[in-house]
Image: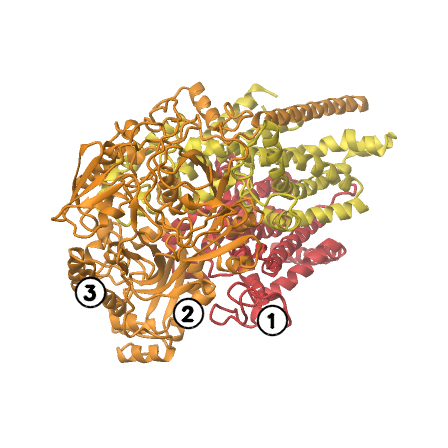
Amino acid sequence: MSASAAQIDVRGERWRLRVRNARSFGRTFLGRTDGVVGLAILAVFVVLALFPDLFVGKLETATTASGQALEPPSAAHILGTDDLGRDMLNLTVHGARISMTIGFLATLITVLLGAVVGIVSGFIGGWLDTGLMRLTDFFLILPTFVLAILLAPIILDTIGADAEILGIKATLVVIVVVIGITSWASTARVIRSQTLSARERMFVDRARVIGSGSGHIMRRHILPNVTNLIVANTVLTFAAAIFTETTLAFIGLGDPFQPSWGELLNAAETSGAPGLGAWWYIVPPATCVVLVILAFTLVGNALDDVMNPKGADRR
Amino acid sequence: MGPRYLARKVIQTIVTIVFVLILNFLLFRMMPGGPEGILLRNPHITAETKAAARARWGLDKPLIPDQLVDYVEATAAGDLGFSYKFRGTPVIEVIGARFWPTIILIGLAELIAIVVGLALGAQAGWKRGGTLDRVGNGASLILYSMPYFVIGMPLIIIFAAELGWFPTSGMLTPGAHYDSFLDQLLDFLHHLVLPLATVSLGLIGGYSILMRSSIIDTRSEDYVTTARAKGLTDRTVLRAHAFPNALLPTVTVIAINLGYVVAGAITAEIVFSWPGLGTLTYDALQTRDYPLLQGIFLLISVAVIVANLGADLLYGRLDPRVRTA
Amino acid sequence: MRLSMPARLARFAMATGLVLSVGAPAAAPVAAADDKVLRIGVLQDLDSTNPYGTILGVGYEAYQLTYEKLVGFGQNIEPIPAFASSWSRSEDGKSWVFKIDPNKKWSDGTPATSADACFSWQLDLDAQKTGDSVGAGYIDYALGPNGSRVTKVECPDPQTMIIYTDDASNRVLQTYIPILPKHIWGKMNYKQIGDDKFDPPDDGSGLVGSGPYLAVEWKTGEEIRFKRNPNYDGHKGVEDEIVFRFFKTNESLVQALKAAEIDYAHNISPEQFKALKGEPNIQVVNGVLNGWTELGFNTYGTGTGKTIKGGGPSTKALLDPAFRDALGYAIDKQKLIDSVIGGLGEIGTTQIPPAMPGVPGHPTWHTEPTNIRTFNIDLAKQKLDAANYGLDSSGRRLDHEGKPISLSLVMPDSDANYAKAGQFITDWFAQLGIKVSPQVLDSDTLYARMLPPEGGKEGKADYDLFIWDWSWGPDPNDALDVFRCDEVGVSSDSLYCNPDYDKLYDQQLVAQTPEERQAILDQMQQMFYDQAPYHILYYNDNLDAYRTDRFGGWQNQPANGVPFMGGFDTWGETQLTDVVVAPSPTAAPSGQAPASGGPSTGGSNPPASGGTGTETSSGGIPVLPIAVVIVVVVVVAGFLAMRRNAARTADDDEDE
């Protein structure tokens, strides 16, 4: 058999193996209630985030407010209105888009950065590893909020306050970058550990003997083994990103012109809604935040368990 | 644990602290407005006066090395500069005055959360799938997903505003005079209940989940199976074998978390107007009081670094597998 | 200054109150538990007890409780005796003679004389002469060329102070300079005083002053306490102590008022104002505010033709009064008032607020302009078209250079209302085909961004529109000043420059009678309204609330204002009575009773020689017992953990 024919065969075999694994994975995952519940909740929110106009119409603004200030829930406004008279259901659904977008982008940055640093550091080792790990330690200790307030004006200055990147306003980009910068470190740590153990495995040594380059090994052998972990970690990072964005907005570091859930809660607090008994200003965004974070956590835990089974004897 | 291990860890810690110092310095010098910003806010100050102020505060010296060296020297001597907002007051005093309220609040909350959370998590994980597990884990997950202010606001509305059992904010009754120390202590405790409940609940969620997952891991280990085979009761196995080992990774997380104690749970403190480091940070953020922020940043960083060191050493002590000296 | 390690630790320990606060409250007051305490809640966090150090309204209210001015403000902002008991003006108008009561005493018993007054005023004069400032610089500038133009002060005898000025008005009577006790501060120059901490002494005796209440203890972030000055010779309020409590949110402020944890809440939100109206034992008051909220334009280059490379207004349209005027028709000020501030305000017009107090015999300087704009989008579009700002094919408004007009709108984060107003304005201007990009920035960043090159070489003034507010003192000069050419780079944020306006300003500065001045002010107000460097959105109201079940005698200052924190004086605090007495609506204080000179509080007051490291303690929370408990628990837990560890190892050994 020629070398290329053997190669094609191997690829085909690999592909079939992958599909089989994916199917069994899917079955196991869907067998778990927590994963399914989480996934369902997420699906709802993702749909709302992608097509808010379909469900509630365009985002109400100050001049297009459809009601009076702080109306309690009624037939016309199922979730009442805010202090400018805008429908709470409308605001909450549109808020999904902003919160989820920030969460998504922040997670993207975090995972990319964390995975690259983690894999490279764990695989290459030596002084590069030590150096990168010191850097990671450093970022791990930085307190998020203090850092956020420092970075925001610097970043705004650099990219220009009125800029838009991929249709995202500069002010949101700041939050995304800040969350990314403060979260990548723990992802890097986790992935590095996994890389270290993957490195020990037999076939890596074999490949090295054959003479494959480091980049090749990292991509073809390490990466598939840490993918599971990256995926589980991504989901949990998303939860943390939403958590952080909500908190940052609540203490006033967000953009009041982009009504994310955190911003809505901030507005509720500053207008004195709790004391006025305007619970409808607080409950919808708060519930959504908790549900989404919960959903991600459930899915993340489920993924983690399915990909790294415990409770059953390993040997 | 070998002396080489200890020495290495300590040196790493010192190096990290030095890096933090430098970052601290650079970050705050990059801020727009600069330290003379306080004068900038006065509409009547001319450009010449601002320039004179810059010179007076030594801000016209070159950034590196002069200002950096000044800064490192001063910090090493315990001089963290003067607050912009509380003009004339050294930063170290401003921070010092708000230190204990946070330590007490978060410290007690951590204690409660550790005891309750770990116990809850261990029981839940041991009897996996049981009722306690479902309910407890569910509740923990929900609490874990709630930022402190989401927990705190309903507590205030229900227990303080509606029922009036507890005060709505603050650490002591405004302008109160106390006939005895006991009166003051009682007033303080009365104000402490709701904030303490808020932070504890938030932490319990996390610790409980952590411990549960750890116990589940441990449960499948060989020595546990052996212990059960030997005929030891379930409780003994849990208490004497599984729990201590499950404690290991949990302990490191808790130790690291303790480092963040000084950061205070900012949102919890805000919601209750608790006069600790959390509200101080918030105020400093609002007014862009850079020296104060710098001081808080340094304090938190050092605390976390030291806590990390402690966690490493603790782990090294508890787990014989780790020592590489 | 290098400290040894033990010294450094000791300093930290002291600062945390660990050493000193065991058990007893930090300042052991002699007050009995049934003293009447007035508790005032505010949303600002006090920054300094130094009159020259504070930049906040709460700071001004605080220092004026301890330190009197030379002349005070009465209920209608008329001059009343304070440190000085009487005054008169010379025939030629170039000097004022102030008389000080021979029985007047400081709170520590030392006689208060003109030497204290001359010392205090000289500090500010010294700063003025060198072009410097005392502390934050808000007080001393009032002696300068745009203020009372004081040239010299003299104190020929302990009861007499003479102030020389070449200003025709009586601005001298409206000066905020605190009279400080010379026997305590006399050794310091204006630079040192500007930076000093003004710490109340540890023994609870309070800062030495001649005002009605003395600052005794300040716990940063929590509260500041004042106790009655027994030697105060003015009208005495019934309260023995006053506390300002600092709150972080409107929410907690109003909750505390409802729960009777405080007696007075300053700056509540419009929604809270409405909700509190029916509450038993609570009275809400919306008083006039001597200030406004504005939409401002960056008009840099008007009158000078200058431009800024890489900054400045983004289009020359902003320099065109016709453009600004047209935009004025696209702002529904009444809607803003209704939606943003709950209907509690007045439509804005000129740069002299109606609430600015006049002078005796001349109650107001405000004049409504002619041709007031209405809200009419179509009319706005017509006016834009008429001024050659037409639309392109995609509906965007073009300026005279053919560029689509796209404006940045900046505002500070200090008030959530700005963002709300900003949303409306963005929407309305969008209907005209003008894109507006709103952005909230923190005050520091905003100041830096709005700085023109005249204010600092890095200044680029990179903005188009802004929303901000101003609040003023009793004289119109400051409000008029902000639009002068000279103020570009200083206090002007519209960067407007109009030589005609400046000429009028100079004329009114030397007007000899209020009527003469009013005639010029009328012209200036009309010019301002027509030219519109700002569109003043509204004169918002001051919204406060107080409980009526512990104190009575609530009087507003001015009469259509609020009792406290109105921005003029601490007159309201001296008028309170017990709750049984019905408030008398017309009370204006007559001259005060002669100094009663009660027993002096005696004791030695340590000369506050600047910035000693005394601790601002955590206010006597029982640190030590709690710390002991925590330590014990941790030790026990650790011990148990160790034992378990040992047990496990023992077990393992068994297994092997």
Callout in the foreground (1, 3): 3
Q: Residue at x 40, y 75 (%)?
A: C431
Which lettered chain is shown in red? A
Mark before the other along the chain sequence, 2 or 3: 2
Identify the amino acid type marked 2: Gln
Q: Chain of mark 2?
A: C
Element class at badge 2:
helix
Quadrant in the picture for the N terminus of chain A: bottom right
Quadrant in the picture for the C terminus of chain A: top right
Within-10-Å neighbours for mark 3: few <14, some 14–19, many 20+: few
Q: Where is residue A188, by image quadrant?
A: top right
Identify the amino acid type marked 3: Ala
Callout in the foreground (2, 1): 2
Element class at badge 3:
helix
Give how far apart the Cα atoms at labels 2 and 1 are.
Answer: 33 Å
* Horizontal relation, residue B143 to residue C356: left or right: right
Q: Chain of mark 1?
A: A
Q: Mark 1 highlights which residue?
A: A55
Element class at badge 1:
helix
Please check whether the numbered discs 2 and 1 fall on a single chain. Answer: no
Look at the picture and state if A15 lies above or below B96.
below
Q: Chain of mark 3?
A: C
Which lettered chain is shown in orange? C
Give how far apart the Cα atoms at labels 2 and 3 are.
Answer: 29 Å
Q: Along the line of sight, which residue is nearer the eye, C65 or C541?
A: C65
Q: Mark 3 highlights which residue?
A: C519
Query: Where in the figure is residue C435, as x and y percent of width and height?
Result: 38, 69
Look at the picture and state if C546 lies above or below A258.
above
